[in-house]
Image (cartoon, grey):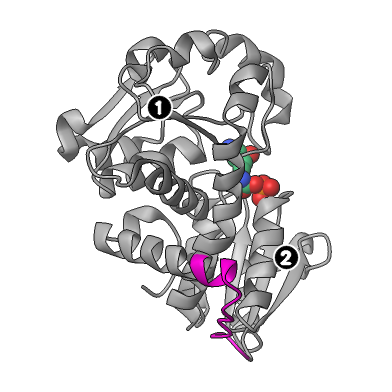
Amino acid sequence: MKHLLKLMDLTGDEILALLNLADQLKYERRHGIPHHRLTGKTLGMIFQKSSTRTRVSFEVGMYELGGTALFLSDKDLQIGRGEGVDDTARVLSRYLSGIMIRTFAQDDVEKLARYGSIPVINGLTDFAHPCQVLADLMTIREYKGALAGQTLCYIGDGNNMANSLIVGGLKAGMRVRVACPKGYEPAPEVLAFAQPYGDACLVTDDPALAARGADALYTDVWASMGQEGEREARAKAFAGYQVNMALLAAANPGCVVLHCLPAHKGEEISPDVFEAHAAEIFDQAENRLHVQKAVLLTVMG
Ligand code: CP
Ligand code: NVA
């Protein structure tokens, strides 16, 4: 594995190897066992969108692995004044050991990898959020003991999270059920990817149908970063797609509830469901740290 651009590029075995390494790193951190396996390495972290979890967990992760992380905001980089991703990639490759980037177009991440000569990690695009879904799979496995045969249900916008959950869930051997309003479905290439999986993947506009028999129930904001102007229209389109106690009743007993955060409580998730499942949701947030350290070691180690 050279880069982490999107989960479609990984095999199921590569995903499981990352989760196993993440479990090991989590154990070592809990027991105070140092793992300075990236001493002398520097990660550049380009942010063209806001972040709490991704920024802090990557920076702390590099520190705990013995390396250094540089926060590079597009407000400061020449990228923000129009310097191309191609030239930025070729310059940063001369200084850094790896790049993590959060941006809008998936194509920019692919270009960074193509023009640069160092590993590139996708820290979220409009199309995909692979680091988040690796943490999600890690969390589900912790709670359920396994991934294969479990049912993962996602309710809401067919956005970066939906795209990556479908791919990651299917590659991990899960059944995936997605409910989105008409016009807000996952990306066409993700639906095409899911096609050969047959009945293992269901995409519907019926939340109750999707939630039936779920072992993990997942949701995300209705308006993603960059879509703030559509908030009102989206609130209307997504009415009826809230993860609440009534919807949860259709899931399997012991169903875990996950949210990538930040959450808009009262919109995509009811406050009572959020608080009743806060332990899972904040374990999920913590697992970003462990799984990203596994990614860093795998591509930069
Ligand atoms: N879930 C997630 O990626 O959070 P941030 O936007 O805070 O990084
Ligand atoms: N779909 C959300 C995820 C945030 C982690 C967004 O892109 O804003």
Give the numbered dot on residue 79: 2
Disc 1: which residue? 254
Helix, strand or loop status at disc 1: loop
Q: Is 282 on the left-hand or right-hand side of 297? A: right
Give the percent coordinates (x, y) of residue 126. Answer: 55, 43
Q: Residue at x 47, y 63 (%)?
A: 110
Magenta span of residues: 27-39
Residue nearest the viewer, comparing 272 with 76:
272
Q: Residues within 10 Å of mark 2 (few under 14, many from 20)?
A: some
Magenta-colored stretch includes residue 38: yes
User: Mark 2 or mark 1: which comes first in sequence?
Assistant: 2
Give the percent coordinates (x, y) of residue 291. Answer: 50, 61
Does ligand 1 reach within 8 Å of label 2's beta carbon?
no
Give the percent coordinates (x, y) of residue 246. Answer: 49, 8
Give the percent coordinates (x, y) of residue 194. Answer: 25, 38
Residue nearest the viewer, comparing 277 with 104:
277
Q: Residue at x 63, y 34 (%)?
A: 224
Residue nearest the viewer, comparing 109 with 271:
271
Q: Nearer the viewer, mark 2 or mark 1?
A: 1
Q: Is 28 on the left-hand or right-hand side of 59? A: left
Q: Residue at x 67, y 31 (%)?
A: 263
Q: Residues within 10 Å of mark 1 (few under 14, many from 20)?
A: few
Question: Can residue 65 be seen at all in this image of the molecule?
Answer: yes
Q: Is 195 on the left-hand or right-hand side of 134? A: left
Helix, strand or loop status at disc 2: helix
Q: Amino acid at mark 2?
A: Ile
Does ligand 1 reach within 8 Å of label 1's beta carbon?
no
Q: Amino acid at mark 1?
A: Gly
Q: Residue at x 49, y 52 (%)?
A: 135
Quarter of the figure with the N terminus: bottom left
